[in-house]
Image: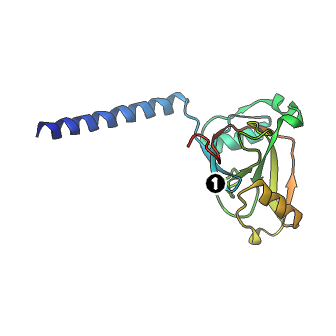
Amino acid sequence: MAWVRNLLVTAVVALIIGWFVLSAREQSGFVVPPVDGFMEGSRIRFIHTEASDPEVAKLLTQMKGSPVLTVPSLAKAPKETLANVYVFTNGVPGEGPFKFQPDVFDNPPGQAGYTPLRALVLVSWKKPESARELKSAEEVKQALAQGEIELKQPGVVINMPMITWPQGGHR
């Protein structure tokens, strides 16, 4: 029976240590919570750390409770160094910044066009009641070609490194 007691003590100690480490990380501000999105039809996870616009930084900070810094110089990044992030302003309810579907990304890591710097592209459904969840940049382009959505590019750049992505990213 000593092994049962030892196992129980070990489990309790592990839980206490885990709780302590997570609490300390949370209180020290070193935790950047991941955000869910879509890329090439698959779920991905990413973080947002900086934005070129103070209102966008504030919105993203409120979204996850982790500070997003305002870095105006990001907006000066050459277009060829940017990929896109499609952010939905209406349509399918979800956990995106505007409380609609998750963001959609183009150019996954491993492709020539990958960069963590993302040009913000706002997506609005012309008929929100007919909206459906889009899960790839290709689906966004098809919906645009069919006249279902409108895109606006406000000139905002956000640093959004990937944590997981299709075809083998840190899963």
- Tell me if residue 120 comes above or below residue 137 in the rendering: above
Question: Where residue 16 sits in the image (x, y, percent)?
Answer: 33, 34
Residue at image location 86% in from the left, 55% down from the top = 151
Q: Which residue is mark 1?
A: 95
Q: Identify the colour scheme used.
A: rainbow
Question: Where residue 77 sits in the image (x, y, percent)?
Answer: 85, 31
Q: Secondary structure at mark 1?
A: loop
Q: Which is nearer the eye, 158 or 89?
A: 158
Q: Which is nearer the eye, 107 or 121?
A: 107
Residue at image location 77% in from the left, 29% down from the top = 71
Question: Where residue 132 sits in the image (x, y, percent)?
Answer: 72, 67
Residue at image location 81% in from the left, 31% down from the top = 74
Seen in the image, is 130 located left or right of residue 1? right
Residue kind at label 1, given as amino acid type: Glu
- Tell me if residue 20 comes above or below residue 42 in the rendering: above
Seen in the image, is 10 located left or right of residue 130? left
Image quarter hosting the C terminus: top right
